Image (cartoon, coloured by chain):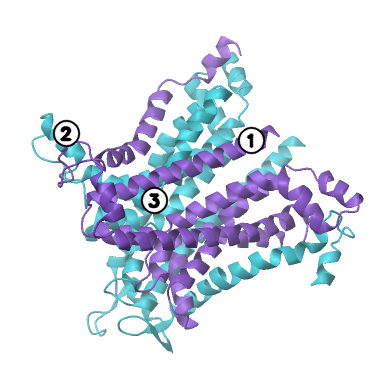
Amino acid sequence: MNKSLKDIRHYFGFLPITILCLTLLYGPLIIVMIYSFNDSQSITIWGGFSLRWYEDVFFGLEAPKFKKAAFNSFSIALMAATTATTVATCAAIAMVRGGQFRGKGITFGLINLPIMVPEIVTAVATLIFFSTIGFKAGYATILVAHIAFCIPFAYLPISARLQGIDESYEEAAVDLYATRLQAFFQVLMPLMLPGIISGFLLAFVISLDDFIITNFVKGAGVETLPTAIFGAVKQGIKPNIMAISTLLLFLSIVIVTFSYLINKSGEKQ
Amino acid sequence: MSASSSHPASGKPHGVFAGLRNWLLLPSWSIICIFVLAPIAIMLVYSFLTKEFRGGVIWEFTFAAYDQFFLNRGLFGDEPVKIEWTYINIFWRSIWQALLATVICLLIGFPTAYYIATRPASTRTIWLFMVTVPYWVNLLIRTVSMKFLIRDNGPINEWLLALDMINEPIHLINTPIAVQLGLFYSYLPFMVLPLYASIERYDHSLSEAAADLYASKWFTLWHIIVPSVKPGIVAGCILVFIPSLGAFLAPDLLGGAKNFMIGSLIEEQFKGTAGNWPFGAAASMILLSAVLLVLMWYARSTSRARTKRGRGSE
C-alpha cells in the first residue's frame, strides 16, 4: 500500500472517537471490577484490596439464593442453546440447501421473528399465552420461552457458515453410496462445526443474558441470575453484586474468546 | 407434505438434502408459530377484552384498553371526551429517546467502525474483538455498572469532588440524561458491527478517484463513502432503534418513575401494581405496530436499493 492511499483513508479525529467509544464501553465495567475487590463495607470508599466479597458470594448469607439462581440459569441456558442449535441447524440446511421454494421469504421472516419483535412484547405475549392455556409459570415456561427466542441467534452464524461450504462435498459422499444421514454426520457436520459452535455459544449467552422475558414467565419462587441480581439491585448496589458481575464478565470474555478462536480456525481451513 | 416438497416449478429439486426440506423446517416452524406467533395473536385478542382487577381478563369484547390509552373521559366516564396525553407523551418520549440514542450511536459508531475497517488485517481483528466483547456481556450488568458509576455518590462524582472540579455532586440518576446514557451504552455494539461489515467491503479506490478529481476529504466522506455504506448505516440504526424503543432496564434502573418509557409502562401492567392486562396488551400492540412500520420501511428501502443497483449494472 502506498503512502498516499493510506493518507486518503485516514480521517482526522476518528482515532480519538474510537478511543472514546472503547472507553465508554469498558469504563463502567472496569470500575465495577475494581470496586468488587474493595475491602470497605461502604461501596464508594476505597478500603484496600480484598477478596471478601467473592467469599461472600460463595459462602455468605445470600450464597444459597445465588447458587440456586446460577444453577437455574446455567441449566436453562445449556438446554435452550442445545435445542435451539439443533433446530436451527436443521432449518439452515433446509434454507441454504433446499433451493428456491414457495414461502422461503416468509420462513426466513418467521425464524427471525424473535429478533425483530421487541423483547418486552414477546414477554407479554408469552405470559398471556401460558396463562391462557393454564400452564403454571416456573422452570419449564422459562425453558420453552428461551428455546423459542434463541433459535434466530443460533441460526444466523450456522447458515452463514453453510453458505460458504460447497455442495459438492455432500454430493460426492452420496455418490460414494453414503446415506443422507452419513453424508450429514460424517461430511457436512464437521465442515459446519465452527458455525454450529458459534451459534450454540451465542444462543447460550443470549439465554444467560435474558432478563425481561424470564422476569415475565418465571412465576414466584424460581429465579435466574439476572432476575436475582435485579431483585438485589432494587434494594441498592451492594459489593457482592459487583463480585457476581465481575465473575459473569469473565465468563463472557472466556466465551467470546473461545468463539473467536473457533471462527479463526474455521477460516484457515 | 411429501407432495409439496418434491416439485418446485423448475422440476425435481437436486441437492442431497432438498427432499427433506419440509421435515427439516418443521421444528423451527412449529416452535416459533406456537410459542411466538400464536402468543402475539392471543395478545391482540386480550387487548380487546375487559380487565379483571389484579391481573387476568374477563372474556367480554371492548375497546376500553385503547380508549384508555388515547382518550380521557373523566373519572366517571361522563365528561366530554378529550385526548389523554399521559400515555401518548410516554410513547413520544420513548420515540425521542430511541431516536436520540440511535443518532449518538451513529455519531460515535461510524468513526469507530471506519477506523477499525481501515486498519491492517493483523490489528483489525484485535480492534474488532475489543468492540465485540461488550456485546457478550450481560445487559443487566452493564446497566447496573452505569448506575453505579453515575450515582450521586458514585466514583465519578467522588473523584470530581476530590479534585475540586465541582462543588456538589452532578445529579444524573433519575434524569432523562441518565436514561439516554444507559440506552446508548446498551446498544452501541449493535451499531458498530453492521457498520464495520459494510465499510470493510468499501472499495477505497473510489476515495482515491475522488481525491484525483480534487474532492476534499470530507466531501468524499459525505458524498461517496456514506452513500456506499448506506445499507450498513440503515441496518445499524434499526438494530439500535428497535430495542431502545422497547427498552425496560435502562429507563427502570437509571430513569426512575419520572422517566417512564413504554417498556416500563407495559411492565407495570403485568408485574407492577397497575395490574391491567388488556391495557398492557394494547400498549404492547401499539409498540409492535410502531416497530413493524419501521421494519416495513426498512424492507422497502432495501428492496428499492437492490432494484436500483440491478438497473445500474445493466
Are discs 1 and 3 both within one chain?
no
Q: Label 3 neighbourhood size at 10 Å, few (<14), some (14-19), many (20+)?
A: many
Residue identifier under label 3:
B139
**Residue type, mark 2 in image:** Trp
According to the image, label 2 marks what residue? B159
Labels 2 and 3: the sequence-earlier one: 3
The residue tagged with tag 1: helix, strand or loop?
helix
Helix, strand or loop under label 2: helix
The answer for how far apart the CA atoms under marks 1 and 3 are is 29 Å
Colour of chain A in the image: purple
Cβ–Cβ under 8 Å for marks 1 and 2: no
Q: Splitting the image into 4 quarters, where does residue B280 fall? A: bottom left
Amino acid at circle 1? Ser
Taking the image as shown, residue B314 lies to the left or right of residue B136, namely right
Task: Tell me the residue at 81%/69% (across/down).
Answer: B4
Disc 1 chain ID: A
User: Residue B175 vs residue B290: left or right?
Assistant: left
Chain identifier matching the cyan colour in the rendered picture: B
